[in-house]
Amino acid sequence: MPKTADIIAHALYEEGVRHAFGIPGGEVLELLEAFRKVGIKFVLTKQEMGAGMMADAYWQLTGKPGVLVATVGPGVVGSTPGVAQALLDRAAMIVIGGDIPRNLKGAHTRKVIDQESLLRPLVKWATTIAAKNAFDQVRSGIAIAKTPLPGPVYFNLPADIAGVEQDEARRFAPAAVRTLPRREDIALIQAWLKKARRPLACIGMNAQLDGAERELKRFLEAWHIPFLTTYKAKGVVAEDHPLCVGATGLSPVVDKIHLAHVRHADLVLTIGFDPVELHAEWNSPWDEKKATVNIDLVPNTHHVYRSAVEYTGSIAGCLHALAAHAPKRAPAHWPVPELERYRQTIKHAIASQPSKGLGPYQVATVLREVFPRDTIATVDTGAHRILVSQVWQSYEPRRFLQSSGLSTMGYALPAAIAAKMLFPKRPVLAMAGEAGLDMVIGEMALLAQHKLALTIVVFRDDTLSLIKLKQQRMKLPETGVVTGSPDYVMLAEAYGGNGFVETNPAELKKAAQVALHSKRFTLIEARINPAEYQRQM
Protein backbone atom coordinates (compact mmCIF):
# COMPACT_ATOMS: atom_id res chain seq x y z
CA MET A 1 0.00 0.00 0.00
CA PRO A 2 1.27 3.54 -0.72
CA LYS A 3 2.34 5.93 1.99
CA THR A 4 0.49 9.19 2.47
CA ALA A 5 3.43 11.07 0.94
CA ASP A 6 3.25 8.80 -2.11
CA ILE A 7 -0.45 9.54 -2.55
CA ILE A 8 0.27 13.29 -2.53
CA ALA A 9 3.18 12.93 -4.97
CA HIS A 10 1.24 10.70 -7.39
CA ALA A 11 -1.78 13.04 -7.39
CA LEU A 12 0.42 16.04 -8.19
CA TYR A 13 2.34 14.16 -10.88
CA GLU A 14 -0.90 13.09 -12.56
CA GLU A 15 -1.93 16.74 -12.51
CA GLY A 16 1.14 17.58 -14.62
CA VAL A 17 3.36 18.90 -11.83
CA ARG A 18 7.07 18.28 -12.46
CA HIS A 19 8.70 20.77 -10.07
CA ALA A 20 8.22 21.70 -6.41
CA PHE A 21 9.94 24.56 -4.59
CA GLY A 22 10.88 25.16 -0.98
CA ILE A 23 13.17 24.43 1.96
CA PRO A 24 12.93 21.03 3.66
CA GLY A 25 12.97 20.03 7.30
CA GLY A 26 12.75 16.68 8.99
CA GLU A 27 8.96 16.80 8.91
CA VAL A 28 8.77 16.72 5.08
CA LEU A 29 11.53 14.23 4.19
CA GLU A 30 9.04 11.46 3.38
CA LEU A 31 7.38 13.86 0.95
CA LEU A 32 10.66 14.77 -0.76
CA GLU A 33 11.45 11.09 -1.22
CA ALA A 34 8.00 10.51 -2.70
CA PHE A 35 8.60 13.40 -5.12
CA ARG A 36 11.94 11.88 -6.16
CA LYS A 37 10.42 8.46 -6.83
CA VAL A 38 7.54 9.77 -8.89
CA GLY A 39 9.63 12.20 -10.97
CA ILE A 40 8.92 15.61 -9.42
CA LYS A 41 12.10 17.67 -9.12
CA PHE A 42 12.42 19.43 -5.78
CA VAL A 43 14.17 22.80 -6.12
CA LEU A 44 15.90 23.95 -2.94
CA THR A 45 15.54 27.71 -2.62
CA LYS A 46 17.16 30.16 -0.22
CA GLN A 47 13.96 31.25 1.50
CA GLU A 48 10.28 30.38 1.40
CA MET A 49 9.30 33.73 -0.11
CA GLY A 50 11.40 33.01 -3.19
CA ALA A 51 9.97 29.49 -3.36
CA GLY A 52 6.45 30.92 -3.34
CA MET A 53 7.21 33.30 -6.20
CA MET A 54 8.70 30.43 -8.20
CA ALA A 55 5.62 28.30 -7.56
CA ASP A 56 3.39 31.21 -8.65
CA ALA A 57 5.39 31.62 -11.87
CA TYR A 58 5.17 27.86 -12.45
CA TRP A 59 1.37 28.14 -12.56
CA GLN A 60 1.45 31.28 -14.72
CA LEU A 61 3.74 29.64 -17.26
CA THR A 62 2.35 26.10 -17.40
CA GLY A 63 -1.24 26.19 -16.18
CA LYS A 64 -0.27 23.42 -13.73
CA PRO A 65 -0.47 23.99 -9.97
CA GLY A 66 2.64 25.42 -8.38
CA VAL A 67 3.89 23.53 -5.32
CA LEU A 68 5.45 25.20 -2.26
CA VAL A 69 6.92 22.99 0.48
CA ALA A 70 7.77 24.34 3.93
CA THR A 71 8.70 22.76 7.20
CA VAL A 72 7.11 23.22 10.60
CA GLY A 73 7.07 26.62 12.36
CA PRO A 74 9.29 29.24 10.72
CA GLY A 75 9.09 27.51 7.34
CA VAL A 76 5.31 27.82 7.22
CA VAL A 77 5.48 31.38 8.59
CA GLY A 78 8.01 32.29 5.89
CA SER A 79 5.71 30.98 3.18
CA THR A 80 3.02 33.61 3.78
CA PRO A 81 4.18 36.19 1.16
CA GLY A 82 4.13 33.51 -1.54
CA VAL A 83 0.72 32.26 -0.44
CA ALA A 84 -0.73 35.78 -0.45
CA GLN A 85 0.77 36.27 -3.91
CA ALA A 86 -1.07 33.19 -5.17
CA LEU A 87 -4.33 34.34 -3.60
CA LEU A 88 -4.46 37.83 -5.11
CA ASP A 89 -2.78 36.96 -8.40
CA ARG A 90 -5.13 34.03 -9.01
CA ALA A 91 -2.53 31.25 -9.05
CA ALA A 92 -3.42 27.63 -8.32
CA MET A 93 -0.88 26.62 -5.68
CA ILE A 94 -0.55 23.60 -3.41
CA VAL A 95 1.14 24.65 -0.17
CA ILE A 96 2.38 21.72 1.92
CA GLY A 97 3.57 22.44 5.45
CA GLY A 98 5.24 19.84 7.62
CA ASP A 99 3.97 19.57 11.18
CA ILE A 100 5.03 17.84 14.40
CA PRO A 101 3.84 14.25 15.01
CA ARG A 102 0.32 13.93 16.41
CA ASN A 103 1.51 12.32 19.67
CA LEU A 104 3.42 15.51 20.51
CA LYS A 105 0.41 17.79 20.13
CA GLY A 106 -0.31 19.40 23.47
CA ALA A 107 2.85 17.95 24.99
CA HIS A 108 5.46 19.89 23.04
CA THR A 109 5.77 23.64 22.45
CA ARG A 110 8.98 24.31 20.47
CA LYS A 111 8.17 25.67 16.97
CA VAL A 112 4.51 24.86 17.50
CA ILE A 113 1.92 27.29 16.15
CA ASP A 114 -1.55 26.78 14.72
CA GLN A 115 -0.41 26.55 11.10
CA GLU A 116 -3.86 25.99 9.62
CA SER A 117 -5.25 29.08 11.36
CA LEU A 118 -2.23 31.11 10.28
CA LEU A 119 -2.75 30.36 6.59
CA ARG A 120 -6.53 30.02 6.45
CA PRO A 121 -7.15 33.74 5.64
CA LEU A 122 -4.71 33.43 2.72
CA VAL A 123 -6.00 30.24 1.11
CA LYS A 124 -9.16 28.94 -0.51
CA TRP A 125 -9.13 25.81 1.65
CA ALA A 126 -6.97 24.31 4.40
CA THR A 127 -6.89 20.80 5.84
CA THR A 128 -4.69 18.54 7.96
CA ILE A 129 -3.99 15.36 6.04
CA ALA A 130 -5.47 12.36 7.87
CA ALA A 131 -4.33 8.77 8.33
CA LYS A 132 -7.25 7.63 6.19
CA ASN A 133 -8.83 9.02 3.01
CA ALA A 134 -5.81 11.19 2.17
CA PHE A 135 -6.45 10.57 -1.52
CA ASP A 136 -9.85 12.25 -1.33
CA GLN A 137 -8.43 15.19 0.63
CA VAL A 138 -5.64 15.74 -1.87
CA ARG A 139 -7.92 15.46 -4.90
CA SER A 140 -10.40 17.88 -3.34
CA GLY A 141 -7.64 20.36 -2.60
CA ILE A 142 -6.25 20.27 -6.15
CA ALA A 143 -9.74 20.76 -7.60
CA ILE A 144 -10.43 23.71 -5.27
CA ALA A 145 -7.09 25.31 -6.17
CA LYS A 146 -7.88 25.18 -9.89
CA THR A 147 -11.53 26.17 -9.99
CA PRO A 148 -12.37 29.83 -10.70
CA LEU A 149 -10.97 31.89 -9.34
CA PRO A 150 -7.78 29.84 -8.87
CA GLY A 151 -5.78 30.23 -5.68
CA PRO A 152 -3.76 28.44 -3.01
CA VAL A 153 -4.82 25.55 -0.79
CA TYR A 154 -2.94 24.33 2.27
CA PHE A 155 -2.14 20.75 3.26
CA ASN A 156 -0.90 20.48 6.84
CA LEU A 157 1.14 17.26 6.93
CA PRO A 158 2.08 15.83 10.36
CA ALA A 159 5.42 14.01 10.24
CA ASP A 160 3.93 10.71 11.44
CA ILE A 161 1.13 10.82 8.85
CA ALA A 162 3.49 11.26 5.87
CA GLY A 163 4.83 7.72 6.27
CA VAL A 164 1.56 5.97 7.09
CA GLU A 165 0.38 3.39 4.55
CA GLN A 166 -3.13 3.96 3.21
CA ASP A 167 -5.53 2.18 0.91
CA GLU A 168 -5.12 3.46 -2.61
CA ALA A 169 -8.38 5.03 -3.72
CA ARG A 170 -9.84 4.57 -7.19
CA ARG A 171 -8.42 6.93 -9.81
CA PHE A 172 -10.92 9.17 -11.57
CA ALA A 173 -10.91 12.15 -13.90
CA PRO A 174 -13.19 14.99 -12.84
CA ALA A 175 -15.75 16.03 -15.43
CA ALA A 176 -15.18 19.32 -17.22
CA VAL A 177 -17.98 21.81 -16.53
CA ARG A 178 -18.53 24.59 -19.05
CA THR A 179 -21.61 26.79 -18.94
CA LEU A 180 -22.41 28.06 -22.44
CA PRO A 181 -24.46 31.17 -23.19
CA ARG A 182 -28.19 31.01 -23.90
CA ARG A 183 -29.52 32.24 -27.23
CA GLU A 184 -31.22 35.22 -25.58
CA ASP A 185 -27.92 36.26 -23.92
CA ILE A 186 -26.19 36.32 -27.29
CA ALA A 187 -29.09 38.12 -28.98
CA LEU A 188 -29.00 41.08 -26.57
CA ILE A 189 -25.21 41.49 -26.70
CA GLN A 190 -25.29 41.10 -30.48
CA ALA A 191 -27.90 43.85 -30.77
CA TRP A 192 -25.73 46.23 -28.75
CA LEU A 193 -22.67 45.37 -30.84
CA LYS A 194 -24.56 46.20 -34.05
CA LYS A 195 -25.76 49.50 -32.63
CA ALA A 196 -22.40 50.65 -31.20
CA ARG A 197 -20.11 53.07 -33.02
CA ARG A 198 -17.36 53.39 -30.40
CA PRO A 199 -17.17 50.00 -28.59
CA LEU A 200 -14.16 49.29 -26.39
CA ALA A 201 -13.11 46.01 -24.75
CA CYS A 202 -11.27 45.83 -21.42
CA ILE A 203 -9.51 42.45 -21.13
CA GLY A 204 -8.27 40.90 -17.89
CA MET A 205 -6.38 37.81 -16.81
CA ASN A 206 -9.51 35.67 -16.44
CA ALA A 207 -9.65 35.41 -20.23
CA GLN A 208 -6.31 33.59 -19.99
CA LEU A 209 -7.53 31.43 -17.11
CA ASP A 210 -10.30 30.17 -19.39
CA GLY A 211 -7.91 29.57 -22.29
CA ALA A 212 -9.97 31.95 -24.42
CA GLU A 213 -7.10 33.52 -26.38
CA ARG A 214 -8.09 32.20 -29.82
CA GLU A 215 -11.79 32.97 -29.39
CA LEU A 216 -10.97 36.44 -28.03
CA LYS A 217 -8.87 37.36 -31.06
CA ARG A 218 -11.53 36.05 -33.44
CA PHE A 219 -14.28 37.97 -31.64
CA LEU A 220 -12.38 41.28 -31.57
CA GLU A 221 -11.50 41.04 -35.26
CA ALA A 222 -14.97 39.92 -36.33
CA TRP A 223 -16.60 42.94 -34.69
CA HIS A 224 -13.58 45.29 -35.11
CA ILE A 225 -13.37 46.23 -31.42
CA PRO A 226 -10.30 48.01 -29.99
CA PHE A 227 -9.07 46.59 -26.70
CA LEU A 228 -6.89 47.36 -23.73
CA THR A 229 -5.63 44.83 -21.20
CA THR A 230 -4.56 44.67 -17.59
CA TYR A 231 -0.85 44.07 -16.99
CA LYS A 232 -1.21 40.33 -16.38
CA ALA A 233 -3.31 39.94 -19.53
CA LYS A 234 -0.68 41.54 -21.75
CA GLY A 235 -0.13 39.31 -24.77
CA VAL A 236 -3.49 37.53 -24.56
CA VAL A 237 -3.69 39.02 -28.06
CA ALA A 238 -0.33 40.21 -29.40
CA GLU A 239 0.23 43.84 -28.42
CA ASP A 240 1.27 44.84 -31.93
CA HIS A 241 -2.22 43.90 -33.16
CA PRO A 242 -3.81 46.93 -34.90
CA LEU A 243 -6.77 46.85 -32.47
CA CYS A 244 -4.60 46.95 -29.32
CA VAL A 245 -4.45 50.32 -27.58
CA GLY A 246 -2.19 49.30 -24.68
CA ALA A 247 -2.32 48.25 -21.05
CA THR A 248 -3.97 49.66 -17.95
CA GLY A 249 -3.63 49.17 -14.22
CA LEU A 250 -1.38 51.44 -12.17
CA SER A 251 -0.15 54.36 -14.28
CA PRO A 252 -2.01 57.56 -13.32
CA VAL A 253 -0.88 59.25 -16.54
CA VAL A 254 -1.82 56.44 -18.93
CA ASP A 255 -4.97 55.43 -17.10
CA LYS A 256 -6.28 58.99 -17.35
CA ILE A 257 -6.09 58.60 -21.14
CA HIS A 258 -7.71 55.17 -21.10
CA LEU A 259 -10.52 56.26 -18.80
CA ALA A 260 -11.29 59.23 -21.05
CA HIS A 261 -11.76 56.83 -23.96
CA VAL A 262 -13.75 54.42 -21.81
CA ARG A 263 -16.15 57.23 -20.95
CA HIS A 264 -16.33 58.26 -24.61
CA ALA A 265 -17.14 54.71 -25.73
CA ASP A 266 -20.81 53.93 -26.37
CA LEU A 267 -20.36 50.25 -25.45
CA VAL A 268 -17.85 48.84 -22.94
CA LEU A 269 -17.18 45.11 -22.76
CA THR A 270 -15.30 43.86 -19.70
CA ILE A 271 -13.95 40.40 -20.53
CA GLY A 272 -12.36 38.52 -17.64
CA PHE A 273 -11.54 41.97 -16.29
CA ASP A 274 -10.53 41.32 -12.67
CA PRO A 275 -10.28 44.64 -10.76
CA VAL A 276 -7.69 43.16 -8.37
CA GLU A 277 -5.11 44.65 -10.78
CA LEU A 278 -6.57 48.15 -10.93
CA HIS A 279 -5.96 51.24 -8.82
CA ALA A 280 -8.71 53.32 -7.25
CA GLU A 281 -9.20 55.54 -10.31
CA TRP A 282 -11.10 52.62 -11.84
CA ASN A 283 -13.73 52.60 -9.08
CA SER A 284 -17.09 53.43 -10.71
CA PRO A 285 -15.51 54.39 -14.07
CA TRP A 286 -18.84 54.99 -15.84
CA ASP A 287 -22.39 55.96 -15.01
CA GLU A 288 -25.20 53.42 -14.96
CA LYS A 289 -26.68 54.69 -18.22
CA LYS A 290 -23.77 53.42 -20.31
CA ALA A 291 -24.23 50.22 -22.28
CA THR A 292 -21.90 47.78 -20.53
CA VAL A 293 -21.45 44.01 -20.83
CA ASN A 294 -19.46 41.88 -18.39
CA ILE A 295 -18.28 38.45 -19.61
CA ASP A 296 -16.46 36.49 -16.93
CA LEU A 297 -15.91 33.15 -15.22
CA VAL A 298 -17.49 34.29 -11.97
CA PRO A 299 -20.23 36.79 -11.06
CA ASN A 300 -19.33 40.39 -10.35
CA THR A 301 -19.50 40.62 -6.56
CA HIS A 302 -16.82 43.30 -6.24
CA HIS A 303 -18.91 46.15 -7.76
CA VAL A 304 -15.76 48.13 -8.53
CA TYR A 305 -17.50 48.61 -11.84
CA ARG A 306 -21.11 47.72 -12.63
CA SER A 307 -22.56 46.25 -15.80
CA ALA A 308 -25.96 46.50 -17.41
CA VAL A 309 -25.66 42.94 -18.73
CA GLU A 310 -23.59 40.15 -17.24
CA TYR A 311 -22.76 36.72 -18.61
CA THR A 312 -21.05 34.26 -16.26
CA GLY A 313 -19.64 30.97 -17.48
CA SER A 314 -17.31 29.97 -20.27
CA ILE A 315 -15.62 33.11 -21.60
CA ALA A 316 -14.37 31.15 -24.60
CA GLY A 317 -17.85 29.76 -25.28
CA CYS A 318 -19.49 33.16 -25.11
CA LEU A 319 -16.92 34.80 -27.40
CA HIS A 320 -17.15 31.92 -29.86
CA ALA A 321 -20.91 32.38 -30.10
CA LEU A 322 -20.61 36.16 -30.49
CA ALA A 323 -18.00 35.81 -33.22
CA ALA A 324 -20.20 33.30 -35.05
CA HIS A 325 -23.01 35.88 -35.09
CA ALA A 326 -20.84 38.71 -36.40
CA PRO A 327 -21.71 40.29 -39.77
CA LYS A 328 -19.73 39.05 -42.77
CA ARG A 329 -18.09 42.45 -43.04
CA ALA A 330 -16.69 43.92 -39.81
CA PRO A 331 -18.50 47.11 -38.71
CA ALA A 332 -16.74 50.45 -39.22
CA HIS A 333 -15.99 50.98 -35.55
CA TRP A 334 -13.31 53.51 -34.55
CA PRO A 335 -11.69 54.86 -37.74
CA VAL A 336 -8.02 53.86 -38.08
CA PRO A 337 -6.69 57.45 -37.70
CA GLU A 338 -8.61 57.84 -34.44
CA LEU A 339 -7.14 54.63 -33.03
CA GLU A 340 -3.67 55.72 -34.06
CA ARG A 341 -4.14 59.07 -32.26
CA TYR A 342 -5.21 57.10 -29.16
CA ARG A 343 -1.99 55.06 -29.23
CA GLN A 344 0.21 58.05 -30.00
CA THR A 345 -1.28 60.01 -27.11
CA ILE A 346 -0.21 57.23 -24.74
CA LYS A 347 3.24 56.96 -26.30
CA HIS A 348 3.77 60.70 -26.00
CA ALA A 349 2.67 60.61 -22.34
CA ILE A 350 5.31 58.03 -21.36
CA ALA A 351 8.20 58.78 -23.74
CA SER A 352 11.00 60.64 -22.00
CA GLN A 353 14.68 61.46 -22.27
CA PRO A 354 16.41 62.97 -19.24
CA SER A 355 18.57 66.07 -19.56
CA LYS A 356 21.43 63.99 -18.17
CA GLY A 357 22.04 60.35 -17.44
CA LEU A 358 19.98 57.30 -18.34
CA GLY A 359 16.20 57.34 -17.91
CA PRO A 360 14.02 54.35 -17.04
CA TYR A 361 12.00 54.83 -20.24
CA GLN A 362 15.22 54.53 -22.23
CA VAL A 363 16.20 51.37 -20.34
CA ALA A 364 12.85 49.70 -21.03
CA THR A 365 12.91 50.76 -24.69
CA VAL A 366 16.43 49.43 -25.28
CA LEU A 367 15.61 46.10 -23.63
CA ARG A 368 12.47 45.61 -25.72
CA GLU A 369 14.51 46.42 -28.84
CA VAL A 370 17.29 43.93 -28.01
CA PHE A 371 15.34 40.99 -26.63
CA PRO A 372 13.39 38.86 -29.15
CA ARG A 373 9.62 38.40 -29.36
CA ASP A 374 9.65 35.06 -27.55
CA THR A 375 11.38 36.45 -24.44
CA ILE A 376 9.81 35.65 -21.09
CA ALA A 377 10.06 38.83 -19.04
CA THR A 378 9.47 39.37 -15.33
CA VAL A 379 9.28 42.71 -13.58
CA ASP A 380 9.44 43.60 -9.91
CA THR A 381 7.23 46.03 -8.04
CA GLY A 382 8.42 49.62 -7.83
CA ALA A 383 8.29 52.86 -9.80
CA HIS A 384 9.99 51.16 -12.74
CA ARG A 385 7.25 48.49 -13.00
CA ILE A 386 4.54 50.98 -13.86
CA LEU A 387 6.66 52.37 -16.71
CA VAL A 388 7.95 49.00 -17.93
CA SER A 389 4.42 47.61 -18.04
CA GLN A 390 3.56 50.32 -20.55
CA VAL A 391 6.72 50.10 -22.67
CA TRP A 392 7.32 46.35 -22.83
CA GLN A 393 5.16 44.80 -25.53
CA SER A 394 4.14 41.17 -25.08
CA TYR A 395 3.19 38.92 -27.98
CA GLU A 396 2.06 35.76 -26.16
CA PRO A 397 -0.12 35.19 -23.11
CA ARG A 398 1.57 34.48 -19.76
CA ARG A 399 4.99 35.64 -20.92
CA PHE A 400 5.16 38.93 -18.99
CA LEU A 401 5.06 38.07 -15.30
CA GLN A 402 4.68 40.33 -12.29
CA SER A 403 3.00 40.59 -8.92
CA SER A 404 -0.02 42.67 -9.80
CA GLY A 405 -2.81 41.77 -7.38
CA LEU A 406 -0.54 41.66 -4.33
CA SER A 407 2.08 43.98 -5.86
CA THR A 408 4.89 42.65 -3.71
CA MET A 409 8.56 43.40 -4.18
CA GLY A 410 10.92 40.47 -4.58
CA TYR A 411 9.02 38.78 -7.42
CA ALA A 412 11.09 39.29 -10.59
CA LEU A 413 14.19 37.18 -9.83
CA PRO A 414 12.45 34.05 -8.43
CA ALA A 415 9.88 34.13 -11.24
CA ALA A 416 12.65 34.40 -13.82
CA ILE A 417 14.45 31.43 -12.24
CA ALA A 418 11.31 29.30 -12.60
CA ALA A 419 10.84 30.51 -16.18
CA LYS A 420 14.37 29.57 -17.22
CA MET A 421 14.07 26.15 -15.58
CA LEU A 422 10.89 25.49 -17.54
CA PHE A 423 12.00 27.07 -20.83
CA PRO A 424 15.81 26.77 -20.97
CA LYS A 425 16.00 27.67 -24.68
CA ARG A 426 13.98 30.86 -24.38
CA PRO A 427 15.52 34.21 -23.46
CA VAL A 428 14.47 35.18 -19.92
CA LEU A 429 14.79 38.73 -18.61
CA ALA A 430 14.20 39.92 -15.04
CA MET A 431 13.75 43.66 -14.48
CA ALA A 432 14.02 44.82 -10.87
CA GLY A 433 14.76 47.79 -8.70
CA GLU A 434 17.63 47.39 -6.28
CA ALA A 435 15.34 47.20 -3.22
CA GLY A 436 13.25 44.37 -4.69
CA LEU A 437 16.31 42.44 -5.81
CA ASP A 438 17.95 42.82 -2.40
CA MET A 439 14.97 41.10 -0.76
CA VAL A 440 15.63 37.83 -2.61
CA ILE A 441 19.27 38.23 -3.56
CA GLY A 442 20.24 34.85 -2.14
CA GLU A 443 18.24 33.14 -4.90
CA MET A 444 21.01 34.22 -7.31
CA ALA A 445 22.91 31.18 -6.09
CA LEU A 446 20.46 29.00 -8.03
CA LEU A 447 21.54 30.55 -11.34
CA ALA A 448 25.00 29.00 -11.51
CA GLN A 449 23.89 25.86 -9.67
CA HIS A 450 21.22 25.09 -12.29
CA LYS A 451 23.11 26.66 -15.23
CA LEU A 452 20.43 29.28 -15.86
CA ALA A 453 21.77 31.85 -18.33
CA LEU A 454 19.14 34.52 -17.81
CA THR A 455 19.54 38.30 -17.69
CA ILE A 456 18.86 40.55 -14.70
CA VAL A 457 18.61 44.30 -15.21
CA VAL A 458 18.61 46.45 -12.07
CA PHE A 459 17.04 49.91 -12.37
CA ARG A 460 19.34 51.47 -9.80
CA ASP A 461 18.81 54.86 -8.24
CA ASP A 462 19.58 53.89 -4.60
CA THR A 463 16.15 55.10 -3.52
CA LEU A 464 12.62 53.85 -3.00
CA SER A 465 11.59 56.36 -5.66
CA LEU A 466 7.85 55.85 -5.47
CA ILE A 467 7.80 56.32 -1.70
CA LYS A 468 10.14 59.30 -1.90
CA LEU A 469 7.84 60.92 -4.44
CA LYS A 470 4.84 60.42 -2.16
CA GLN A 471 6.75 61.99 0.73
CA GLN A 472 7.53 65.01 -1.43
CA ARG A 473 3.92 65.44 -2.46
CA MET A 474 2.84 65.20 1.18
CA LYS A 475 5.50 67.84 2.01
CA LEU A 476 7.24 65.40 4.36
CA PRO A 477 10.99 65.18 4.91
CA GLU A 478 12.80 62.33 3.15
CA THR A 479 12.86 59.43 5.62
CA GLY A 480 13.69 55.75 5.25
CA VAL A 481 13.97 55.63 1.45
CA VAL A 482 17.73 55.29 0.82
CA THR A 483 18.41 51.66 -0.06
CA GLY A 484 22.17 51.31 0.53
CA SER A 485 22.54 48.44 -1.95
CA PRO A 486 25.78 46.54 -2.74
CA ASP A 487 28.19 46.47 -5.68
CA TYR A 488 26.13 44.34 -8.06
CA VAL A 489 28.99 43.62 -10.46
CA MET A 490 31.04 42.08 -7.68
CA LEU A 491 27.96 40.25 -6.46
CA ALA A 492 27.22 38.79 -9.89
CA GLU A 493 30.79 37.61 -10.24
CA ALA A 494 30.71 36.10 -6.75
CA TYR A 495 27.64 34.08 -7.76
CA GLY A 496 29.29 32.91 -10.99
CA GLY A 497 27.84 35.34 -13.51
CA ASN A 498 28.74 38.40 -15.58
CA GLY A 499 28.32 41.94 -14.30
CA PHE A 500 28.03 45.32 -16.05
CA VAL A 501 27.32 48.89 -14.99
CA GLU A 502 25.81 51.11 -17.69
CA THR A 503 24.98 54.81 -17.72
CA ASN A 504 23.89 55.47 -21.33
CA PRO A 505 21.60 53.77 -23.88
CA ALA A 506 24.31 52.78 -26.36
CA GLU A 507 26.40 50.93 -23.77
CA LEU A 508 23.29 49.39 -22.24
CA LYS A 509 22.35 48.01 -25.66
CA LYS A 510 25.79 46.42 -26.07
CA ALA A 511 25.65 44.85 -22.62
CA ALA A 512 22.15 43.49 -23.28
CA GLN A 513 23.31 41.93 -26.54
CA VAL A 514 26.23 40.28 -24.75
CA ALA A 515 23.88 39.00 -22.06
CA LEU A 516 21.48 37.59 -24.62
CA HIS A 517 24.19 35.31 -26.04
CA SER A 518 26.06 34.51 -22.83
CA LYS A 519 26.21 30.97 -21.46
CA ARG A 520 26.24 32.37 -17.92
CA PHE A 521 23.75 34.60 -16.21
CA THR A 522 24.30 38.34 -16.58
CA LEU A 523 23.44 41.17 -14.21
CA ILE A 524 23.31 44.65 -15.72
CA GLU A 525 23.19 47.56 -13.33
CA ALA A 526 21.49 50.46 -15.14
CA ARG A 527 22.29 53.66 -13.27
CA ILE A 528 19.15 55.68 -13.87
CA ASN A 529 18.11 59.26 -13.36
CA PRO A 530 14.83 58.95 -11.38
CA ALA A 531 13.58 62.44 -12.33
CA GLU A 532 11.37 60.85 -15.00
CA TYR A 533 9.20 59.25 -12.33
CA GLN A 534 7.98 62.70 -11.31
CA ARG A 535 6.34 62.96 -14.71
CA GLN A 536 4.85 59.49 -14.64
CA MET A 537 3.25 59.38 -11.20
Image (spheres, rainbow, N blue to C red):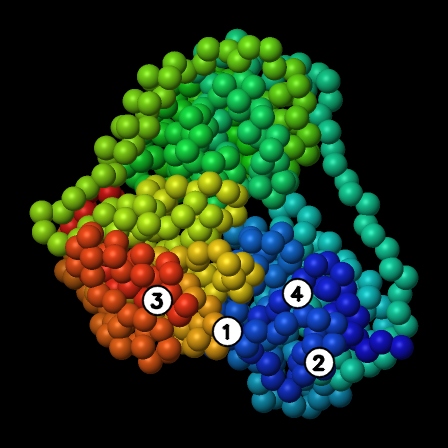
SS class, disc 4? loop
The answer to whether 32 is drawn above or below residue 377 in the figure is: below
- Of 480 and 41, nearer the camera is 41
- The residue where tag 1 is placed is 450
Residue 18 tag number: 4
- Looking at the rendering, in which quadrant would you find the N terminus? bottom right
SS class, disc 1? loop
- Numbered-mark total: 4
| First in sequence: mark 1 vs mark 2 | 2
| First in sequence: mark 3 vs mark 2 | 2
- The residue where tag 3 is placed is 522
Residue 33 tag number: 2
- Of 370 and 119, nearer the camera is 370
Instruction: Kindly tell me whether residue 480 is visible in this rendering.
Output: no
Cα–Cα gap, marks 4 and 2: 14 Å
Foreground tag (1 vs 4): 1
Quarter residue 176 falls in: top right
Quarter residue 466 falls in: bottom left
Cα–Cα gap, marks 1 and 3: 14 Å
The x, y position of residue 237, in whole percent, is 50, 35
| First in sequence: mark 4 vs mark 2 | 4
Cα–Cα gap, marks 3 and 2: 34 Å
- Of 95 and 477, nearer the camera is 95
The residue depicted at 59 percent of the width and 81 percent of the height is 24
Instruction: Kindly tell me whether residue 500 is visible in this rendering.
Output: yes
| First in sequence: mark 1 vs mark 4 | 4
Cα–Cα gap, marks 1 and 2: 20 Å
Task: Tell me the kind of residue under disc 1.
Answer: His
The residue depicted at 52 percent of the width and 52 percent of the height is 88
**Residue extending farthest left:** 355
Task: Tell me the kind of residue under disc 3.
Answer: Thr
110 vs 436, left or right, is right
